[in-house]
Image (tube, coloured by chain):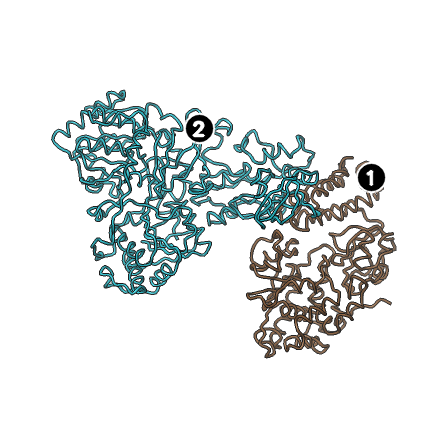
C-alpha cells in the first residue's frame, strides 16, 4: 500500500492503481469520457488531466499509476485549465443539437460541460459533419456527435469479442464505423448505447419517444434467460419505454443482453390482449372478469367431471408465484399433468426423479475456470451473460471445448469435437478418454474408442485446476438428452469437474421449486398427444413446443382450453375457449430464481395493459372459485413463503443404467432462435429484425 | 574549413556506394565480424557508444548508449531492434540518402544494435513514399544475407539475426515510435500511451529498442574508430557528425554531413547561400516541429543542441528550412498548420480538434478575414494543445506557430488590419 495525497486528502491505495480509481474510491470526482472501469485504458479523451506535483505537464488520471508520496491536485489552476482546454476542444465540433438529441439529459458531455465548459463558444469556423451509418435495427448512429472516446470500439474488442466498430481515418476525419456498412450483430450490442457518453449511439427502438428526465425508474429482473440480469425499467405514462442494466457485479456486471434490453417492445405490442374474452357458440366476445372466470371454472368443471386428463402448461419465463399457484390449483383439482419443458423431446430421466437444472459455479467464478466443456450449447446466444464470463476465462487462458451438433461461431477460441458420428458419440469418446486416462472402466463407453481430439479434451479437463461441464440448450432439445446428461456426468465425475445442467429460461429453477413438473402425470410431449382440456399460462403451443403442429392439434382437439395470455392471436382464437389477459414481467410483482438458485423478487413497474391482471391474482381467484383451500393470499410474498420451503432436487445420474443410442440423432434437433424463445420477445419487432431472430442466419461459423 | 562526409556519407563520392563490394572494400562489416566473433562484448559496445556521446538523430536527442542500456540482453524471450526510417517531418530528407548511398552501414548498425540488446530480429520501417530507398535497402539486406552477414549462425558464431523491411503507408504519425510499432503490427498507426515504454513493452509486446536511421548507420564507424574519435569530432553535449537537410530559399539545397557545432553560417554557405541575392529572414533549424528563429539569432548560432537551444529553438532532426526576406510568415504558418491538421492521428482530443482550429484561423487570416482577437486565440489554442496530448505531434503543431507569432507578430497584425500580407502591394 502507498499513500497518495489528492487535494490535500491522504488516501491509501495499492501501488500501481490508476489515479482515477483511487480518486473515485475517495469520492473525489475527476471528469472523464474515454475511461470506463470495464474497458482497457485509452487515455485519448484527455478530460481527466490532473496536476501531479513534479510533472511539468498535466497527466491523465486514468493512465497514471499512483506511487508513494504522490501529490495530486484535481482542481488546481493547472488542472482546471487543462480540463477546460479539453472541454473546449470537445465542444468546438460537437453539434448543438441537444434539444433533438435522445442523449439530452443523460449525456456525459452535457454534464461535464456544465462544470468545465463556457456558455458561449468562441469557435467560429465551420463545424465537422459526419454521415450517419446504418448499424442495424437496434442502434441509431448520429456520428457527428461522436467525441471519439472509442468506448464502443473497445467494448467490441474486449467484451463482446466481435470488433464490429472501429476507427477509420485520422485527424478530424477519424470516424467510428463498421468500415463496410453493415448491421451490428453482437448479441450484446445494446451495451454500446449505454457506453456511448454522447448521443452518437442511441437506442433505435427508443428514439424520439420520450426525454430521459420524464422517465420513472423501476428495478426489475430480466425475464428471458436464467442468469437473472438486474435491470432498470424506464417508464412514462404507465408504459415501459426502455430497459437498461442495473449494475450487479455478481451477475451481469454492467451489461445486458440485447434480448433482455429490447424485449420490452413486446410488452407494448399491438397484439396485447387487454380484455377477457370468451368463445360462445363459436363467437368471441369481450366480457368482464367475473364472467370470464366463471366461464372458465364451469368449462373446466364440465371436463373434470369425468376426466382428470387436463393439461397444465406454462412458460418457464413465468414467475415462481404464478407457477406455484397454477400447479397448486391443478393438483387441488386432481390434475397432475403439469409441465414447462415443451421443447424437450427426451424425458427418459423423469422416471428417476426431477433434476433441478443449476449452474454449479457461481456466475462470478465462471470467469476463473481453467477448462470448460460445453455440451450441446451455443452458449453465446443461449445465455449471453454467462458466455461473457466464459469468454473472460478463455481470454485468461482457459481451454474451452464444445461437443455440439454443428459448429457455431463463438467469440473466443473453442475447440469443437465434431464428426459424422454425432454429438452423443463424440461425448462418449470424451468420456472414454477420461476413463482411459484415469484407468477407470465404464460399461456405458466400453465399446467406444477415443480419438485424439477427444483425448485432448479429456486431458485438459483432468489437468485443469477448476473445470466445468456445461450442458446447454441444444442438449435439452436433443432426442438423446438423458444419455447426454449421463455421459456429461460421467466425464465430470471422472475428471473431477463440476457438472452444470444449465437452466435456460428465466425461471426453470423456479419452476422446479414450485413443483411445476409432472410428478405423477403426463409430460409436455405426452400432453401434446391430446388432452381433454388445457390450462395454459404464457404459452403459444405452435412456437413453444418441440413439435408445434402436434401441440396445436392437441389444443384444437381439446374440449376446453383456458389461455392465460398477454397476447391475442388468431391461432388462439381457433382453439381456445377463454382468453384471460395477463400481466407481463414488467406488470406484475414476482420472483425469478436464477441459474445459481438465487431468488430475485421484483415489483410491478407499470400497470398491466387494459384490464390485464397479474396471473398470480387470477389464479388466486380461480382457486377460490374452485373452492380450493389455501388460495386466500393478499400479497405475492405469501405465495413465495410457501414455495421456498421447497428445495432443489438432484438426480444421481451415475446410478442410472442407460445405453447409448444406435444412431446419430443430431439432425432431429430443432434449434431455436434466442428471439423466438417466448411470446414477449417474439413480439419485439426490433429484435425480430436482427439476424439472430432466425436460426438460419443466427451467427454460425 | 568545414569537414564533410566523415561518417554516414563517407562513401557517397564512390560509384555504386550502395553496393556491398564498395562497403566491404572500405572496411564495412569488419566491426560486425568482431562482434559476432565475441571480440567485442555487448557491454564494451555500450561503453563505446556512450563515450561517443551520440544522441538520437531522429529529433529527440536521447543518448543512444543510455537507451541501449535499458535493455536486458540476457532476459529470456524475443526482443526486437527497430529502425525508424519513417522520415516524414517537413524539411527532413537525410535518412533517405543513407538508404540510397550507404545502406550497408545501416544494415551493419542494426545488426550490431540487435546483438547488443539481444534481438535476433530487426525491422526497418521506411516511409511509404521512399520507394527507391526501400528497393536499395532490400537489395542491401539480400546482399548481406548472401555474404553471410545476416541469417542463421552468422559467420559460424551461433548468433542469428535477420532484418525485415516494412514500408509505411504515408502517415506522418507513424514516425512516432509507438505508432510505428502499431503500424508494423498491422494496426492503425496511433501512438500508445506511455508508460510502458517500448523497452519493456514494444513490438508485439516484446522489449524493443527503436533508433533513428542516422543513429544506427553511425554505429559501425563509432566502433571502428572509437567512441572518443566520434565524440571529438563534435562539441560538448553533442558528439560526432550530423546530417543536415538544408531546404528552402538557398541556391544549393541538399544534405550535408558536417561536424556537430559547425556554425550555421558555414552550413548556409555550403548550401550556396540565399537564392536570388536576397537576405535571410528566418530559419527553422530542426524541422517543422521546431521553433522559427529570426535571421539575427540564426546567424549567431552553431549547429549543435546547446547552441540552437540557446538561440531559442531545437536541433531536432537537423532539417534546416531557410526562409528569405520575401517569405510571408503567415502563409508559411498556414502551410505548416495544414500539415499537422492533416497528419494528426485523431486519437486524442486536443490535437484532433485543435490542429484544425489553428489551420482554419490561419486560413481565415490569410483570406483577409482575420479578427483582432485571432492572435490571442492562436496563442491560446496552441497553449491548450501543448502538454495535453498523448504524443509529440500535438505539441509540435504549436511550436513553430507560437514562435512565429512571437517573432513576427506584426505580419499577423498586418493581415488582420489590412486583409493582406505585408508583401502585397495594394
Quarter of the image holding residue B375? top right
Position of residue A212 measured from the top left corner of the image (x, y, whole percent): 50, 30
Position of residue A672 measured from the top left corner of the image (x, y, whole percent): 32, 44
Q: Within 10 Å of the Cα at label 1, are there few (<14), some (14-19), or many (20+) other Cα atoms?
A: some
- The residue labelled by disc 2 is A235
Q: Which label number is shown at residue A502?
A: none
Q: Can residue B136 be seen in this view?
A: no
Position of the C terminus of chain B, as image quadrant, is top right
Q: Which residue is drawn at 58% across and 72% down?
A: B160
Position of residue A40 measured from the top left corner of the image (x, y, whole percent): 54, 48
Nearest to viewer (mark 2 / mark 1): 2
- The residue labelled by disc 1 is B414
Chain coloured brown here: B
* Residue toward you, A131 or B309: B309
Q: Mark 1 lies on which chain?
A: B
Q: Which residue is drawn at 87% across and 53% down?
A: B278
Q: In this view, does B376 lie to the left or right of A392?
A: right
Secondary structure state at the residue bearing disc 2: strand
Q: Is residue A12 left or right of residue A321?
A: right
Amino acid at each position: 500500500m502507498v499513500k497518495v495525497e489528492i487535494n490535500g486528502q491522504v488516501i491509501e491505495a495499492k501501488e500501481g492503481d490508476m489515479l482515477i480509481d483511487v480518486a473515485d474510491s475517495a469520492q473525489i470526482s475527476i471528469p472523464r469520457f474515454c475511461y470506463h472501469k470495464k474497458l482497457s485504458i485509452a487515455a485519448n479523451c484527455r478530460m481527466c488531466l490532473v496536476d501531479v506535483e513534479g510533472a511539468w505537464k498535466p497527466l491523465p488520471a486514468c493512465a497514471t499509476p499512483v506511487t508513494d508520496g504522490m501529490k495530486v491536485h484535481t482542481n488546481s489552476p493547472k488542472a482546471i485549465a487543462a480540463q477546460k482546454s479539453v472541454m473546449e476542444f470537445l465542444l468546438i465540433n460537437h453539434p448543438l443539437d441537444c434539444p433533438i438529441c435522445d442523449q439530452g439529459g443523460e449525456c456525459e458531455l452535457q454534464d461535464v460541460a456544465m462544470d468545465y465548459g463556457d456558455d458561449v463558444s468562441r469557435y467560429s469556423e465551420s463545424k465537422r459533419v459526419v454521415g450517419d451509418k446504418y448499424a442495424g435495427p437496434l442502434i441509431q448512429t448520429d456520428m457527428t456527435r461522436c467525441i471519439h472516446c472509442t468506448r464502443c470500439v473497445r467494448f467490441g474488442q474486449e467484451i463482446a469479442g466481435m470488433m464490429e466498430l472501429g476507427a477509420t481515418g485520422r485527424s478530424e476525419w477519424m470516424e467510428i464505423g463498421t468500415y463496410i456498412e453493415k448491421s451490428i450483430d453482437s448479441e450484446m450490442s445494446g451495451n454500446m448505447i449505454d457506453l456511448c457518453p454522447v448521443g452518437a449511439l442511441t437506442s433505435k427502438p427508443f428514439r424520439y419517444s420520450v426525454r430521459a428526465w420524464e422517465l420513472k425508474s423501476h428495478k426489475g429482473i430480466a425475464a428471458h434467460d436464467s442468469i437473472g440480469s438486474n435491470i432498470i425499467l424506464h417508464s412514462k405514462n404507465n408504459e415501459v419505454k426502455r430497459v437498461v442494466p442495473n449494475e450487479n457485479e455478481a451477475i451481469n456486471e454492467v451489461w445486458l443482453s440485447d434480448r433482455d434490453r429490447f424485449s420490452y417492445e413486446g410488452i407494448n405490442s399491438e397484439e396485447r390482449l387487454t380484455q377477457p374474452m370468451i368463445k360462445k357458440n363459436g363467437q368471441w366476445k369481450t366480457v368482464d372478469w367475473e364472467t370470464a372466470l366463471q366461464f372458465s371454472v364451469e368449462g373446466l368443471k364440465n371436463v373434470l367431471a369425468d376426466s382428470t386428463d387436463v393439461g397444465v402448461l406454462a412458460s418457464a419465463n413465468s414467475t415462481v408465484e404464478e407457477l406455484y399457484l397454477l400447479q397448486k390449483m391443478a393438483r387441488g383439482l386432481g390434475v397432475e399433468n403439469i409441465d414447462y419443458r415443451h421443447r424437450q423431446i427426451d424425458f427418459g430421466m423423469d422416471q428417476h426423479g426431477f433434476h433441478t437444472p443449476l449452474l454449479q459455479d457461481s456466475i462470478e467464478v465462471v470467469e476463473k475456470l481453467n477448462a470448460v466443456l460445453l455440451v450441446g450449447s451455443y452458449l453465446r446466444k443461449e445465455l449471453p451473460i454467462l458466455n461473457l464470463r466464459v469468454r473472460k476465462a478463455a481470454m485468461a487462458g482457459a481451454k474451452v471445448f464444445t461437443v455440439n451438433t454443428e459448429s457455431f461461431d463463438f467469440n473466443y477460441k473453442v475447440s469443437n469435437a465434431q464428426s459424422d458420428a454425432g454429438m452423443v458419440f463424440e461425448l462418449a469418446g470424451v468420456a472414454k478418454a477420461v476413463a482411459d486416462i484415469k484407468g477407470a472402466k465404464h460399461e456405458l463407453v466400453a465399446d467406444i474408442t477415443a480419438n485424439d481430439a477427444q483425448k485432448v479434451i479429456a486431458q485438459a479437463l483432468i489437468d485443469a485446476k477448476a473445470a466445468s461441464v456445461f450442458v446447454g440448450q441444444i442438449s435439452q432439445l436433443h432426442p438423446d438428452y438423458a444419455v447426454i446428461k449421463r455421459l456429461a456426468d460421467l466425464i465430470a465425475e471422472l475428471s473431477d469437474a463440476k457438472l452444470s445442467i444449465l437452466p435456460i429460461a428465466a425461471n426453470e429453477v423456479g419452476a422446479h421449486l414450485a413443483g411445476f413438473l409432472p410428478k405423477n402425470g403426463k409430460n409436455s410431449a405426452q400432453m401434446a398427444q391430446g388432452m381433454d382440456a388445457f390450462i395454459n399460462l404464457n404459452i403459444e403451443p405452435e412456437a413453444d413446443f418441440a413439435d408445434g403442429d402436434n401441440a396445436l392439434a392437441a389444443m384444437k382437439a381439446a374440449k376446453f382450453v383456458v389461455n392465460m395470455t398477454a397476447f391475442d392471436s388468431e391461432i388462439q382464437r381457433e382453439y381456445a375457449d377463454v382468453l384471460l389477459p395477463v400481466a407481463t414481467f414488467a406488470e406484475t410483482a414476482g420472483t425469478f430464481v436464477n441459474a445459481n438458485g438465487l431468488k430475485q423478487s421484483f415489483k410491478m413497474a407499470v400497470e398491466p395493459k387494459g384490464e390485464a391482471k397479474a396471473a398470480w391474482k387470477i389464479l388466486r381467484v380461480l382457486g377460490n372459485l374452485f373452492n380450493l383451500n389455501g388460495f386466500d393470499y393478499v400479497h405475492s410474498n405469501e405465495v413465495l413463503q410457501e414455495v421456498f420451503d421447497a428445495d432443489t432436487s438432484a438426480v444421481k445420474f451415475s446410478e442410472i443404467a442407460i445405453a447409448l443410442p444406435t444412431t446419430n440423432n443430431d439432425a432431429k434437433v430443432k434449434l431455436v432462435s434466442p428471439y423466438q424463445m417466448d411470446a414477449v420477445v417474439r413480439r419485439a419487432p426490433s429484435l425480430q429484425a436482427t439476424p439472430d431472430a432466425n436460426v438460419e442466419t443466427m451467427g454460425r461459423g | 574549413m568545414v569537414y564533410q562526409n566523415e561518417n554516414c556519407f563517407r562513401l557517397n563520392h564512390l560509384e555504386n556506394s550502395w553496393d556491398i563490394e564498395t562497403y566491404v572494400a572500405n572496411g564495412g562489416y569488419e566491426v560486425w565480424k568482431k562482434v559476432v566473433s565475441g571480440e567485442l562484448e555487448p557491454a564494451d559496445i555500450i561503453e563505446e557508444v556512450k563515450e561517443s556521446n551520440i544522441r538520437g538523430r531522429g529529433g529527440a536527442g536521447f543518448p543512444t548508449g543510455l537507451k541501449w542500456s535499458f535493455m536486458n540482453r540476457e532476459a529470456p524471450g524475443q526482443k526486437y531492434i527497430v529502425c525508424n526510417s519513417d522520415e516524414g517531418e517537413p524539411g527532413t530528407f537525410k535518412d533517405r540518402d543513407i538508404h540510397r548511398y550507404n545502406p550497408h552501414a545501416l544494415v551493419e548498425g542494426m545488426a550490431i544494435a540487435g546483438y547488443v540488446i539481444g534481438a535476433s530480429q530487426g525491422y526497418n520501417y521506411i516511409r511509404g513514399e521512399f520507394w527507391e530507398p526501400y528497393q536499395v535497402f532490400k537489395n542491401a539486406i539480400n546482399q548481406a544475407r548472401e555474404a553471410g552477414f545476416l541469417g542463421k549462425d552468422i559467420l559460424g558464431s551461433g548468433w542469428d539475426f535477420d532484418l525485415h523491411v516494412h514500408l509505411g503507408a504515408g502517415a506522418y504519425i507513424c514516425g512516432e515510435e509507438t505508432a510505428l510499432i502499431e503500424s508494423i503490427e498491422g494496426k492503425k498507426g496511433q501512438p500508445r500511451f506511455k508508460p510502458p515504454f517500448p523497452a519493456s513493452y514494444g513490438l508485439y509486446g516484446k522489449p524493443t529498442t527503436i533508433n533513428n536511421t542516422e543513429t544506427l548507420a553511425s554505429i559501425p564507424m563509432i566502433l571502428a574508430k572509437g567512441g572518443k574519435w566520434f565524440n571529438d569530432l563534435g562539441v560538448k553535449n553533442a558528439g560526432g557528425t550530423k546530417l543536415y537537410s538544408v531546404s528552402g530559399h538557398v541556391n544549393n539545397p541538399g544534405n550535408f554531413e558536417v561536424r556537430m557545432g559547425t556554425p550555421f553560417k558555414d552550413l548556409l554557405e555550403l548550401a550556396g547561400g540565399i537564392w536570388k541575392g536576397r537576405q535571410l529572414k528566418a530559419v527553422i533549424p530542426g524541422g517543422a516541429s521546431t521553433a522559427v528563429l529570426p535571421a539575427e539569432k540564426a546567424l549567431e548560432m552553431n549547429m549543435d543542441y546547446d547552441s540552437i537551444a540557446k538561440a531559442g529553438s531545437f536541433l531536432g532532426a537537423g532539417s534546416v528550412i531557410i526562409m528569405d526576406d520575401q517569405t510571408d510568415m503567415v502563409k508559411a504558418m498556414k502551410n505548416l498548420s495544414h500539415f499537422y491538421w492533416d497528419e494528426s492521428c485523431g486519437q486524442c482530443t486536443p490535437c484532433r480538434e485543435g490542429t484544425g482550429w489553428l489551420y482554419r484561423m490561419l486560413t481565415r487570416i490569410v483570406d483577409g478575414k482575420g479578427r483582432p482577437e485571432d492572435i490571442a486565440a492562436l496563442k491560446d489554442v496552441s497553449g491548450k494543445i501543448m502538454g495535453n496530448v498523448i504524443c509529440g505531434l500535438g505539441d509540435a503543431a504549436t511550436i513553430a506557430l507560437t514562435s512565429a507569432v512571437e517573432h513576427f507578430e506584426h505580419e499577423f497584425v498586418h493581415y488582420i488590419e489590412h486583409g493582406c500580407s505585408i508583401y502585397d502591394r495594394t
